[in-house]
Amino acid sequence: MSKLSQLTAHLKACLPEGVCNVEFSSEMDSIQFISAQRDLGNGQYRMHIKQYDVTIAWGRFPYRNVNPDYIGILIDAWLNDNDDIDIQLDLERPSMLVDLNGSNQAVVIVTLQLAENVNMREDENGIVPMDGTRWTLCEPEFYVAQEIDIAGVLND
């Protein structure tokens, strides 16, 4: 699942019911590929980082019932919890346009940039040939040790 899909799901889950049901959109464009090749181990490989512009918009946001500032807070909180890029990127910070109308609703447009790793794993049926092996897209799997035995000599 892309970061944009995750952020969109986060907004829909946190904002009051119905706020994201009418005239709501969440889109990406201007995708750039940043070279960041890295062996991740376990037959996995990061090919690049995908950086893209995001536009999240509401055509009829109920600003009298829900303060639009919650959108910025929710996005910042999500960004703090989902920064998994190990390369320093100069991403555009979120910005928001709120255009009030007379019907207790507003057009709200949020723009920001996101970046995510694009990873592959070895797969004999994969469609990407590289280094004599076939590869397919994947979410990386990391293994965490549950216990450890340390052997050695202790000096008193």
Image (tube, rainbow, N blue to C red):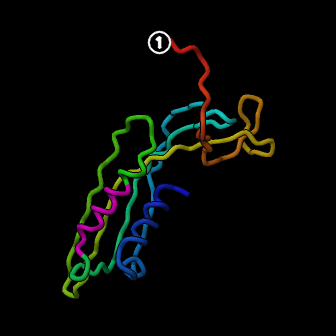
Looking at the rendered structure, the secondary structure element under dot 1 is loop
Percent x, y for residue 40?
A: 60, 34
Relative horizontal placement of residue 134, taking residue 88 as reference (left or right): right
Give the residues drawn in magenta, as a range.
67-78
Mark 1 burial class by Cα count in 10 Å: few <14, some 14-19, many 20+: few
Judge from the rendering whether residue 72 lies leftward or rightward of residue 21; answer left or right: left
Q: Nearer the viewer, residue 31 or 61?
A: 61
Q: Quadrant of the N terminus?
A: bottom right
Vertical arrangement, residue 101 with respect to residue 140, above or below: below
Where residue 68 sits, quadrant-wise, is: bottom left
Q: Quadrant of residue 135?
A: top right
> From the viewer's perspective, is residue 66 above or below residue 133?
below
Q: State the residue lying farthest toward the top.
A: 155
Query: Viewed as shown, does residue 114 lie left or right of 143?
Result: left
Q: Is residue 99 shown left or right of residue 128?
A: left
Measured as percent of width and height from the top left, residue 92 is found at: 31, 48
Disc 1 marks a residue whose amino acid type is: Asp
Residue lying farthest right? 124
Q: How many marks do you count on the picture? A: 1
**Residue visible at 35% across and 78% down in the picture:** 16
Front residue (pair 86, 33):
86
Magenta-span inclusion, residue 75: yes
> Which residue is label 1 attached to?
156
Q: Is residue 96 magenta?
A: no
Instruction: Name the residue located 28 percent from the left edge and 75 percent from the top edge.
Output: 107
Q: Residue furthest front?
A: 156
Q: Residue at x 65, y 37 (%)?
A: 44
Characterize the magenta stretch by its predominant secondary structure.
Answer: helix
Q: Position of residue 95 (x, y in %)?
A: 26, 58
Residue at the (22%, 88%) spot, across then down = 103
The percent coordinates of residue 96 (x first, y second) are 26, 62
